[in-house]
Image: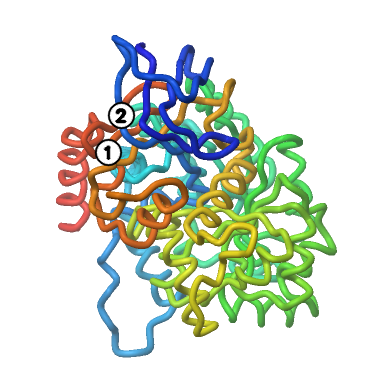
Amino acid sequence: MPSLWFDTALLAEGWAKDVRLTVDGGRIRAIATGVPAREGDARHGIAVPGLCNVHSHAFQRGMAGLTEFRGVSDDDFWTWRELMYRFLDRIDPDDVEAIAAQAYVEMLEGGFTRVGEFHYLHHDPAGNAYADLAETAQRIVAAADLTGIGLTLLPVFYAHATFGGAPAAPGQRRFLNDIDRFAALMQASASAIAPLPDANLGVAPHSLRAVTPEELDSVIGLTPLGPIHIHAAEQVKEVDDCLAWSGQRPVAWLLDHAAVDPRWCLVHATHLGDGEVMGLAASGATAGLCPITEANLGDGVFAADAYLRAGGAFGIGSDSNILIDPGQELRALEYGQRLSRRARNVLGSADRPSVGATLFAGALSGGARALGQAPGGLAVGATADIVGLDPDNTSLYGRSGDRLLDGWLFAGSGGVVKTVWRRGECVVEGGRHHAADAVGRRYRHTLDKLLRQ
């Protein structure tokens, strides 16, 4: 492919002008700065690295917007979950693939170039295993292959309804495995991702309420090197139930009883005590934050200010996929702090006053860590996952350097992401994924079927 030339690019060492990126074999092989475009170069405006989406339940894209209807009682996460269970009871493997492909198209169009798929829809609607244990994982892989998004597959172990090994609820039957069958599922999932050029496999004990301590140890042992993701302290009820079970809050329990380290991603971690904030930051683990979903479900607000000032790592995820937009996820993260603190520019600092630059850099590095990738950035040897921003977009026009990130994250309302390259291949052009029309038609056909049931 021709070299890519940009007016300005956010390289690993900072912003540079007149930048030529030479790509070969899916990686950046050379970078030149301060050079004019030459004949044959593909000329573009602004380049930034692609971001990792650390937490996705792809199938939930199909129910986005369908639960925004108040019932006769107060709504919360738990009433939403019952509606979600009813929706997933209708989904077959073809539906999983169609909905995931739509979600992944939207992720790429927004600037996510890799997804951590927290995949727990393993079995048929009756709870029986498919002939191929990894049937639905194969469909996630097919969606990633079609769209081109990088995939970190995170098969979920789920065994219990709540703390102490309580029997699972009927709505959870499609998720459930014992340790032996889950080990076989992990092997089948490793085979499923093998054809994708840079996919990797982690593991996801769903939450402390869904696994016993013994099961947690066994599940972690199934992936000696891959990422480990777990839901933690998303809801106040979860914290209260954990205290009743163990005498400790969920994150405190994990820090004391599991070898939490940089391989771990604690998803949400919404309700932390001061000691948990400091302990999680010191562990090197990543907090997997999903501010749009957390707002949609009424979860609460993560203690980002204290956590970041303690040196904590974070990534962002689209979780329920109610809205897929990395810029709006980062905006919501800062705005949650502003509303809680009644202050502005909370997550900026004297060293990096630009809030947009602080948020983008944090999500870039923490996201890569959470998904078991090399540090994110545009550098020689890095995967050529590149997002081209439109310099003529009104939120970016007349800006440079970190002001571009501030404009995108806080003033962008669409059309900011113009072109996306994934492993050097252009998958989004003019803001539109090359397979968007075909994927959209299949998605709409799927919803026609599901919503008639």
Residue at the extreme right = 256
Disc number lying in front (1 or 2): 2
Residue at image location 55% in from the left, 56% down from the top:
358
Q: Quadrant of the C terminus?
A: bottom left
Q: What residue type is labelled 1?
A: Lys
Residue 439 placement, left or right of 422: left
Q: Is residue 355 above or below residue 74?
A: above
Residue at image location 29% in from the left, 59% down from the top:
63
Say few, some or many: other residues with alpha carbon within 10 Å of mark 2 (under 14 / 14 to 19 / 20 or more): some
Q: Residue 57's x, y, as percent?
A: 44, 52
Kindly state the secondary structure of the residue where label 2 is placed: strand
Residue 285 placement, left or right of 436: right
Instruction: Work out whether mark 1 precedes mark 2 in sequence or the reverse, and give the earlier one.
Output: 2
Give residue 44's mark. Answer: 2
Work out whether residue 168 or residue 327 is closer to the camera in this orientation and state it.
Answer: 327
Q: Quadrant of the N terminus?
A: top left
Q: What residue type is labelled 2?
A: His
Asked if the residue at tag 2 contacts the one at tag 1, i.e. Cβ–Cβ closer than 8 Å, the answer is yes
From this viewpoint, is residue 133 visible? yes
Give residue 418's mark. Answer: 1
Location of residue 97 by image quarter = top left
Give residue 409's mark. Answer: none
Residue at image location 66% in from the left, 82% down from the top:
240
The alpha-carbon separation of the residues under discs 1 and 2 comes to 10 Å
Q: Is residue 403 above or below residue 263?
A: below
Residue at image location 38% in from the left, 83% down from the top:
75
